[in-house]
Every structure is written in structure tokens, then in C-alpha cells.
Image (cartoon, grey):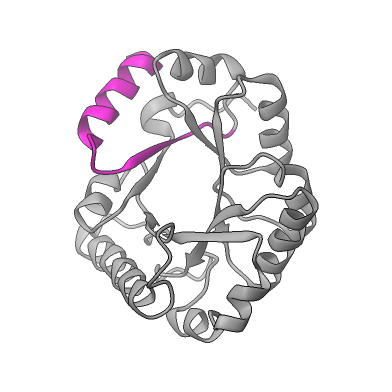
Amino acid sequence: MSIKENLIHIKAQIGEKATLVAVSKTKPNEDIMEAYEAGQRIFGENKVQELAAKYESLPKDIEWHMIGHLQSNKVKYIAPFVQLLHGVDSEKLLKVVHKEGVKCDRKIPCLLQVHIAEEETKFGFSEDELVQLLTDELIESVSHVDICGLMGMATNTDDEGQIRKEFGHLKLIFKNLKKTVFTNQESFKEISMGMSGDFEIAMEEGSTMVRVGSSIFGYRNYH
């Protein structure tokens, strides 16, 4: 199947339930343009250099999301244009994003990454860390950051019950924060969870944004 056919198939599964982020990391511009011509406008990258290069060379109405682990010294390269940072996983990074937002006079939308998997390798805050971090003082001090929600990755396992439990846990954390910290903030509404292998379970558990790459572009890596 072509990229266009894959995209139509995925979009039919998602419907209106969630926003599709087409994960275009390592894919050439031709592949992205094929998806673009089929109507896709939101793309996700996981390396700053590649993201900046693609932003320069591709249509300007594309919404670029940074979905990978972000090093604080690289925020400045994408701060002027990035539409959403999915993986803000430390207080330090949050403050750097604010600082770069001040410099380019824009409020940078981001998601806080929560560690929900049982694997040690995944980045992110624990629920307790988030509760301690998100004081009124902190939120006021990062006025050029728009915290739009949470992001999480489930354990890489075939155990659907475990995946469902982890996604359900993220939804619960989101609901608690919405009730206690972000009560009056309308923009705090996104739960980014689910990838090619588990996005259907993620949507059943309340995901509003799914990150799908290989099911659209195939597995071939051009690097």
C-alpha cells in the first residue's frame, strides 16, 4: 500500500476521536510530501537537527511536533516554530523552554512527559514529581510555556492488559491535574499516548493525540 492509502486507512480508524501526528522521523521529504498531498498537516520528529531542516524545506502550513527526548541546549533551534513539544520531562527543560519562548516572544505549547511504563529506559515525571512540581509559583514563572496536557509511552510488550492499565493510569493523572492544578486552563486538554502498535487501545483509554509512524510510512529507514 502507498503512504496515501496507509494514511486513509489509519484516519478511518481514528475518526474524530484523536489528532493524528504522522511520525516522519528518518523519512525523506518526498514521503512527507506524499502524506501532505493526501491531506496530512501534523508531523512529528524526534531529532532537533532533522526537524529544523525539514521545517526550512517543506510547506510552511505544516505543524511540526517534537516527539523525542529533547536536550535543553537544543530548544533554541526549534523554539520559533515548533507547534508542540511532547516530551518535557524535567523542571530544567521547562524553564529553558520558557526562556526561549521569551526570546522569540511566543508561548510555546508543550506536554509534560509522564513515566507510566515498567521499563527503566523511558523518560518522564512520576505522578508524585508532577504534583510537587506544579505549584502556582512555578506555573507563573514559566509564563511563556503553555502546558497543554500530558504524554506517555506504554511498556513495549504484547500484554494488552498491561498497556491498557498504563494508559488508564495516565488518563487518571490527567484528570487529577485538571481538577486540582489546571481547573481554569482550557488549553490543558491533550493526552498524547498511543503509537502504531497500540493507538487503538490508547484511544479507548482516553488518548486525544496518537503518534503513528511505521503504519503510515512503512518500516524502511532511509539513513
Vertical placement of 175 versus 136: above or below? above
Vertical placement of 164 versus 55: above or below? below
Vertical placement of 191 versus 46: above or below? below
Left/right of residue 105 with respect to residue 178 in the rendered view: right
Residue 142: image x %, image y %?
Answer: 66, 69
> Does the magenta segment cover residue 3?
yes
Residue 101: image x %, image y %?
Answer: 71, 54
Residue at screen point 68% across, 50% down: 106
Vertical placement of 170 versus 208: above or below? below
Observer-nearest residue: 39 or 33? 39
> Does the magenta segment cover residue 165?
no
Q: Specify the segment rendered in magenta.
A: 1-25
Residue 121: image x %, image y %?
Answer: 53, 65
Residue 169: image x %, image y %?
Answer: 30, 71
Q: State the image quarter where residue 185 is shown.
A: bottom left
Residue at screen point 42% across, 61% down: 188
Observer-nearest residue: 203 or 105? 105
Left/right of residue 118 with respect to residue 68 in the rendered view: left
Residue at screen point 44% across, 34% down: 213
Point out the image quarter for the N terminus.
top left
Observer-nearest residue: 112 or 2? 112
Q: State the image quarter where residue 3 is shown.
A: top left
Residue at screen point 47% across, 18% down: 36
Q: How many marks?
A: 0
Point out the image quarter for the C terminus.
top right
